[in-house]
Image (tube, rainbow, N blue to C red):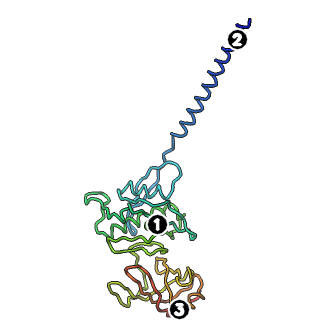
Amino acid sequence: MKKRYFVLAVVLCMILMMFTGCGRDKKEEKDETAKTTEIIKMTKVYVGSRDDYGAYNMAYTGKLTPEKLIKGIEDTTGWNLALEQNVSIDKDNGYKVVFSKKSLFYTAEKLDKDDEFYVNGTENYYATVLDSIKETLRKHYAKGDDRFIIYYYGPEDSALEIKEIGKTLVMGNSYESFYVYTPGVSAVSSSNNLDVYDTEAIFIGSVDGEFYRMRVGAQINNYRVTYNALKTIMKTSSEGDILKIRIKEDKNTGEKLVTKIYWRHKK
């Protein structure tokens, strides 16, 4: 009798283990399938410069991020757009893009002339790269507002230096375009290293007591003010005020120094 009960107990245990094992295998298989099966979604990246952009399909999985969009431009064009870190958003809601030393800005890497995305002219090439990234992110994140703020940086949060064309993007200044047509600018003088011009600017705010943020035409930049008399005017200005100013712009560093304020129209 004892032997019979023992055999029955063994059989029951085997059946229980069999059903438990089957249930576990199915659950594991389901979890594994969920992990490996991701929905492929489609969006677009935009390649071009100024107002001339082409739209190109891009496939992605998971959540769409600025990094995936930039990688989509890279995969579409063949440009090396290696980033040093993920894109972050500054306090003014500006998108901060930091390129690594492996990116084309530091390797001067270009496509062959027979490539679809070859750009003739070195400056046009770099302008097209930066404009394409800005336009793609703007299309996805500006939420219908044409005004979109983006900052470009080099490795270790340095100024983005494009040695091949002798151009450095000033740190803290939002990027608009290499080709910004600014109405109302009157040239005073120009040399190899310095441009002097008069223009109207819309005051935005103070940065640190010596630098002030203003819009000139379509471009928003930080302008340096060193003369105390001019600082007094800047300190008493409000967002939206219009100023007629003279600027000395260093072509090597991109720094813009305000040397005169002709008048100010309070908002």
In the rendered image of this protein, does residue 15 appear above or below residue 255? above
Numbered disc 2: secondary structure: helix
Marked residue nearer the N-terminal end (3 or 2): 2
Gap between marks 1 and 3, in whole Å? 34 Å
Which of these two is toward me, 131 or 164?
164
Q: Residue flagged by tag 1: what amino acid is it?
A: Glu
Looking at the rendering, in which quadrant would you find the C terminus?
bottom right
Whole-percent x, y for residue 159 in the image = 44, 72
- The residue identified by callout 3 is 230
Label 2 sits on residue? 6
Q: CA distance from mark 1 to mark 2?
A: 73 Å
Q: Quadrant of residue 70?
A: bottom left
Q: Residues within 10 Å of mark 1 (few under 14, many from 20)?
A: few
- Circle 2 packing at 10 Å, graded few (<14), some (14-19), many (20+), is few
* 19 vs 47, nearest the viewer: 19
Question: Compared with residue 104, is residue 235 higher up or lower down, i.e. above or below?
Answer: below
| Quadrant occupied by the N terminus | top right
Q: Which residue is mark 1?
A: 156
- Residue 60: give x, y in percent of width and height: 47, 50
Looking at the image, the residue that sits furthest to the front is 2
